[in-house]
Image: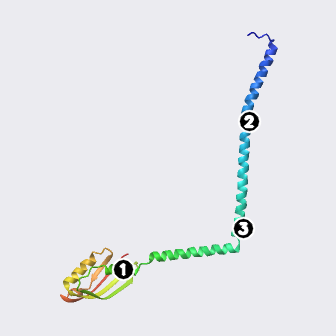
Amino acid sequence: MINLLPPSLKQKLALEHQKNVVMILGFTILVPLICLTLLLLSIKTYISAEVNSQKIASEQAQKISQTPEFVKFGETIKNGNALLLQLKSFYKRQIYISNALHLISGINRPENLYFTSLDLHQTQSLAFKVTIAGFSQSREDLLVFQKNIQQKKEIENLVFSPESWINPSRTPFYLTFEIKQ
């Protein structure tokens, strides 16, 4: 195809064509930028509104927390928590005598061995010191009882009095030991 237009008109048409391309490209770039700007502006507005509402809620909570009733209630809660901590530490340090009695009653005793007295008291190390007095029909029964006590891992510092081993029959005995829990 032959273009019969004069060169000045050709330049004018080429310039118009370039203007149209630039305008189309400008709109293609400008419209998304405007949309992005509007989106960011709406996000900023939403965040600002949320921050303001949180400030108002915080101020209201501070006003409520400064009332005398709330301050008194807070002190009551602190005192209650302190009491609970004291109770918790008290119960952690507690050793139950029933456990010690259960352990003592669980020691196998020969038939001819009898207790005449049993004394339990708590030591500083949170253990029980046990003192038992009694008598045995024979020294052999007393030896079996000693062996049975030594098999219990909770029992420490087992001591029989020297007099416990003197008589071969109708042997009175006296022993002490500690129960660790």
164, 80: nearer the viewer: 80
**Residues at marks 2 and 3, CA–CA distance in whole angstroms:** 48 Å
Q: Which mark is residue 20?
A: none
Q: At numbered mark 3, what does the secondary structure look like: helix, strand or loop?
A: helix
Of the two numbered discs 1 and 3 on the same chain, state the one appearing first in sequence.
3
**Residues at marks 1 and 3, CA–CA distance in whole angstroms:** 56 Å
Q: Residue at x 73, y 49 (%)?
A: 45
Quadrant (top left, top right, bottom left, bottom right) of the N terminus: top right
Location of mark 1 (residue):
100
Relative horizontal placement of residue 109, taking residue 88 as reference (left or right): left
Q: Position of residue 160 (x, y in %)?
A: 26, 83
Quadrant (top left, top right, bottom left, bottom right) of the C terminus: bottom left
Q: Given the image, on which type of amino acid does mark 1 rest? A: Ala
Q: Which mark is residue 31?
A: 2
Location of mark 3 (residue):
63
Q: Position of residue 159 (x, y in %)?
A: 28, 82
